[in-house]
Amino acid sequence: MTYWLLNHKKLKLVCFFVTLLLSVNQVFSLDFQSDDINVLNLENTVFNNDTQIKLESDWEFYWSEFIEPGQFKNKTFIKVGTDSWTKYTSPQGKKFPSFGYATYRLQFTILKNTPPLSLYIPKLYSSSKLWINGKLISEIGHAGVSESTTLHRRFSQMIPLHTNETNFEIVIQVANFYHNKGGINEALIVGPSNYLNYKKSVRIIADVLFIGCLSFIGIFFLIFFSMYWNKDKAILYFGIACVFLAYMGLSDRYAPFATIFKTASWCLLTKIEYVSLFLAGTSASLFFSVIFSDYVHQWYIKILKYGFLLLSALVIVLPPPYFTQLILPFLIYMIVNIIYVVFTIMKAITGNRHDSILMLASTLLGSIVFSFHIFFFIGERGHAIIYVNFGYVAIFLLLSMLLMARFSDSFKELEIAKEVEVDQKKQLSVKSQELSKMNIELKENLRQLESSNAELDSFNHIVSHDLKAPLIAMHTLVTFIEEDLDTKINEETEQHFVLLKDRISKMNALINGLLAYSKAAKGNKGKEIFKLNDLLQELNDVVNHKNENTIIFPKSNIEIYTNRIELEHVFQNLISNAIKYNDKEKAIVTIDVEEFPKQYVFSVKDNGPGIDPQYHTKIFEMFNKLNDNDEIESTGIGLSIVKKLVSENQGTISVESKKGIGTTIKFSWKA
């Protein structure tokens, strides 16, 4: 008996040192634990109406093991808190990977006959199975030991506790094969059932407010854009951003597609959620770029589109858990974007953009609400989430007001444009009536012109036949009289006969000139290709057949596509005049040409007596002759015909000359 007592005392001493060593190791969370007595004592906690206790420490963590209640004896564990298991360190000093499975266990005690309590379990990463006091309560998805045997799902739970019991054991099996986080990432909460249910109701109200309002605003603006006002892309981008943000809130809190499609891949649903988030950011940024298009650089829009497109593509392409790590670069990208937005808004305010004040107010309010949401523990304040979500809704209502004001301005501009259009239609109607009246007058003028042309043709016929015939008869009669006079007539009478014949010849030449002028530009308008110098050579053979004068051709014998007869008539008149009126022993006529894309420019230069500048325009008038010398036969119609032909070919004609220095006549001709 004494021996047993001594051994029993030694055993107690050994147990004391072992317990001490285990306690030290438990502090450092690096050594294994084997003691089943690891109970969180909450007996001193008085659960009032708004009391809630966070179970965020003293959890037993069993890595790569699925342990059910009653099987924990002699199992080794480490003590952990409620962080992702990727932050835990194994006894070998290594971080746990994202993918894997584990069992959590927590024991706690409360006073008997406390008010009805409930246990709030947040969304776990990612599939879980829950026991309370040895009883299987729920299974979210299916927790397996591999990706193929795991059905990932994430839902929060509210579990009532039997308060006639004082000792509670919570066992949670968790499996994660898709996210970069794993396990319990948020503290479980124990509190009065009424209070926790009240918080849940408040959260549902806040979600309904946020999701419902954003969905309504987004759908309203999308319908408004598609059916009424598709000219403003800002409406489209704003509607898309609202719809995607509403979907994000709905998916994050309630995961409707996971509920509807029981076997759908959670990884796929999460990728859709991430892409929706990135598209919401893209649409919101594009909305801003349209509103302030006058102040936004083009490189900003390109960086914006390509950046979000790259993030979305990476979400689709990258396997788990890598795509879940893109939230951080997205947030950094959005923060830089918001800084640029504020800078641009301030620049717009200095530019007297009135709508920029409303945009600035929305941006500042959004920053305040977002900061409050992130940096304050709204979970501990029952109504805080309502205020936050109401703040978000207020932001989008302000932006809606901005869009409505923008639409109102555009609508007013449209109304003004319509009024202007109506006035223009009235003016157009008046002009149309005037044009109709002018068309009637034009038709009448055309009829009169046709009648005049007919009369002119008749006149030409009269001139060519009825007037020229008597002149020919007079000339013949004078000749007959001269022949009938047998006796020699005196010199004076003979001079009179010569003068009479000369006058008859000049009258005949005048009539021929009038006929030529009336027929100018009325003949064949057909065009042909020919060499310019070939044409000039033919003219030289006619007007200078004895080679008494010198005609110098252009150096380049270019090809011309035009009406040959008209151009020949112009050159014949100009060259003939240069020879006819030349006061030198030998006339020298130099012809040159310049070729342009749409016209030719010709020049005819002589060494004649020149023309005084005051007569440069008069020489093209009909019957105008600067030289009254009767020895030079001229009707004063030749240059009038030249000018008419040049004008008919959309050209101009000009004179460069001084008295006694020769004359240069330049004219252009449409190519």
Image (cartoon, rainbow, N blue to C red):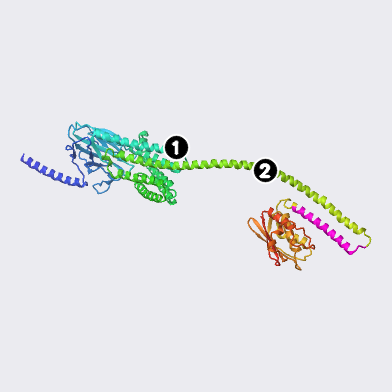
- Which of the 4 quarters of the picture holds residue 643? bottom right
Q: Residue at x 94, y 60 (%)?
A: 486
3D distance between C-alphas at marks 1 and 2: 54 Å
Q: In the picture provided, is 13 more to the left or to the right than 283? A: left
Circle number at residue 223? 1
The kind of residue tagged 1 is Ile
Q: Position of residue 638 (x, y in %)?
A: 74, 57
- Which of the 4 quarters of the picture holds residue 101? top left
Query: Is most of the magenta stretch helix, strand or loop?
Result: helix
Q: Is residue 452 one of those drawn in magenta?
A: no
Which is more toward the observer, 269 or 515? Answer: 515
Q: In the picture provided, is 174 more to the left or to the right than 603? A: left
Which of pointers 1 and 2 indicates the residue nearer the eye?
2
Q: Which quarter of the rendering shows the C terminus?
A: bottom right
Q: Which residue is mark 2?
A: 441
Q: Is residue 508 one of those drawn in magenta?
A: yes
Q: Position of residue 460 (x, y in %)?
A: 78, 50
Give neighbour class at mark 1: few <14, some 14-19, many 20+ (Cα, 10 Å).
some
Q: Is residue 322 visible?
A: no
Residue numbers of the magenta segment = 488-517
Q: Position of residue 630 (x, y in %)?
A: 79, 62
